[in-house]
Image (cartoon, coloured by chain):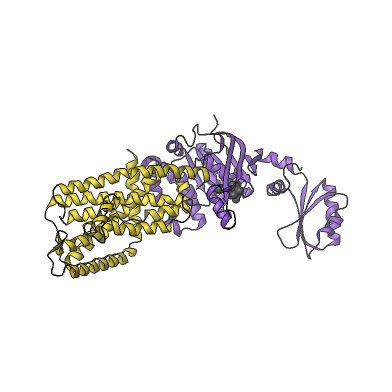
Amino acid sequence: MNVVEVEGLRKEFKSYSSRSGLAGAFRDLFTRNYQVLRAVNDISLHIKKGEMVGYIGENGAGKSTTIKMLTGILTPTAGRILVNGMNPHKEREKFVRTIGVVFGQRSQLWWDIAVQESFRLLKKVYKVSDDAYEAHMGEVIATLDIGPLLDKPVRKLSLGQRMRCELAAALIHNPPLLFLDEPTIGLDVLVKMKIREFLKEINRKYQTTILLTTHDLADIEALCERVVLLDEGKIIYDGRLDQLQKNWVEGKQIHFEFHHPVERHALIELSGGADVKWRQGERCNEWIAGIEGDEEAVSQLMSRVIQQHPISDVKVNQASTEEIIRNIYEEGLTHG
Amino acid sequence: MGNSAVYLEMIRIRFLMMLAYRTNYYSGILIYSINIGAYYFLWQAIYGAQESIQGMDAAQMTTYVAVAWMARAFYFNNIDREIAQEIQEGKVAVEMIRPYHYLGVKTMQGLGEGLFRLLFFSLPGMVVIWLAFPITFSDNFAVWGFFFISILFSFIVNTQINLLTGMATFFLLYNTGLIRGKRVVIDLFSGLLLPISFYPLWAQEIMQFLPFQAISYIPSMIFTEAFTGTEIYQALGIQLFWAAVLIIPIQLMWVLAKRQLIVQGG
Ligand SMILES: Nc1ncnc2c1ncn2[C@@H]1O[C@H](COP(=O)(O)OP(=O)(O)OP(=O)(O)O)[C@@H](O)[C@H]1O
Ligand SMILES: [Mg+2]
């Protein structure tokens, strides 16, 4: 049986707008103008026990809205949801005992009291026995390395420290299903790695099912075999991550870092007949050429460019996941 | 009833939080003392040579003022403002993923706050006031018993009104005005500043039909022994009545609020 069973899930938000002027305000009293925004548009999703699924998409794609519906915070406008065999709204109290949730943007710990007081409270809330708590949380605290933070109030923790505590707090009742909405937002590389290791570990040990949203594709690469790609409320890809890489971009990326500013048209001229896409890089005077073709084409392009424009650095690599996702965001799935 | 452990824990945690911020209370003690002192001298002046007004003598009035303020420390809480803030910050939505009742938790937090103030504020405060002003304490244990039952009801009724005001944030854009207005109304109509029996008759008639007297007037009248015999039972009956009746609008409002929350996302 699937842990998450979602069929034709839809969420519409009504946003009211006010008319201008006094007459408008008066009319607003009787009939208000509103627009309907379809944040999640008829998605179907099935997740098996023990899967780790990456849920990605641009800002505003509808990821958080989906998670809120799956956790019972929002009701769907239409569709069927079954999570852990339950309708999140019908049996709220029973249902929420079977899930763990972390919203990276929002703290769920009590701000003014020590972390361990929050833990103690949650232990009571979820009716965890002393033995189960000691055995399970002892390990969680050790793995996340938060022992020294336990007697500090949450408001005095740094973001990374707090996030590790949030994660631990979501696991106090050792739920079989975990929803993580941007759990690594704003964290440094070391903390991110610690969190990834930790998630892998609990997934291995308890077969915990994890649905994770993030804008850091390295999280997905490290954790998830399966990705679900959301665009304007619709699922545009659901499958293996490596398949996505194979299907959508072939060829290579060449990163040039020039000594001087270079114009796009100058570079396009140098491309000759080859199928090259030029894109400005993040660094100063950096240009990235996406080229479809064999090694011959790559080396020809490189030599032509380097002869014309002095460079300080050049790199050739396979398109990264980030590159691929960017491509999909920018050009949609029709391309490639 | 496994949930009672949770609610006890909520009280404990709020108690700890208050302890962490206890310095805030030193100023509170000062403000309360000034209030009590000011009303004491005011009433002294009003009574002048008069033996009694509206059936209360000057000593009873002094006791009334002192106990009314000390009881206020117990029943008063800020959960209306807290609820409003948590609604505006979207925290209430997230509370829906916890296996407990949000309003129940808020009430327990209010109780934790009240117990803290009762122990660390009212009790020492009462001793100070007893030393400073001529206050008469009853030597009748039953009166003390009735008084404690009565301030428990004060807490319940006041908290219920706070829950309603706090939840109004779901439906109003700006709730600060309502919260502030409610505070003034309670201080005025609950009998904190002036015993209800001192109001003009027509005003008393109206106040009879409002829940506010259950908050301050009744426990203070019991403590000063201005209520005796069946009057006490009647007064407690009024408190019980309001505590029961107010559950209805709270439930209604919560159902509406929850619908708004889960459909529109707060
Ligand atoms: N309560 C709400 N009322 C009205 N519109 C909303 C509400 N919540 C979300 N939306 C809209 O729904 C869309 C999806 O929002 P959502 O938060 O799900 O995006 P997201 O994929 O999580 O984005 P991000 O990556 O920025 O977190 C957005 O256009 C947003 O403006
Ligand atoms: Mg989001």
Q: Which chain is purple?
A: A
Residue A239 percent coordinates (x, y): 65, 37
Identity of the residue drawn at 31% across and 56% down = B76
Who is closer to the viewer here, A183 or B138?
B138
* Quadrant where the image shows the N terminus of chain A: top right
Chain for colour yellow: B
Q: Nearer the viewer, residue A301 or A328?
A: A328
Relative horizontal placement of residue A32, taking residue B192 as reference (left or right): right
| Closest to the observer, B61 or B83 | B61
**In the displayed structure, would residue A60 be above or below residue B185?**
above
Answer with left or right where residue B38 lies relative to residue A86. Answer: left
The quadrant holding residue A52 is top right
Q: Residue furthest top?
A: A1
Q: Quadrant of residue A265?
A: bottom right
Seen from the viewer's position, the closer of residues A73 and B37 is B37
Where is residue A174 drawn, in percent x and y? Answer: 46, 40
- Residue name at image x 56 percent, y 48 percent: A32
Residue A179 seen in this snapshot: yes
**Where does the C terminus of chain A fall, quadrant-wise?**
top right
Coordinates of residue A331 in the picture (x, y in percent): 73, 47
Q: Position of residue A166 (x, y in %)?
A: 48, 50
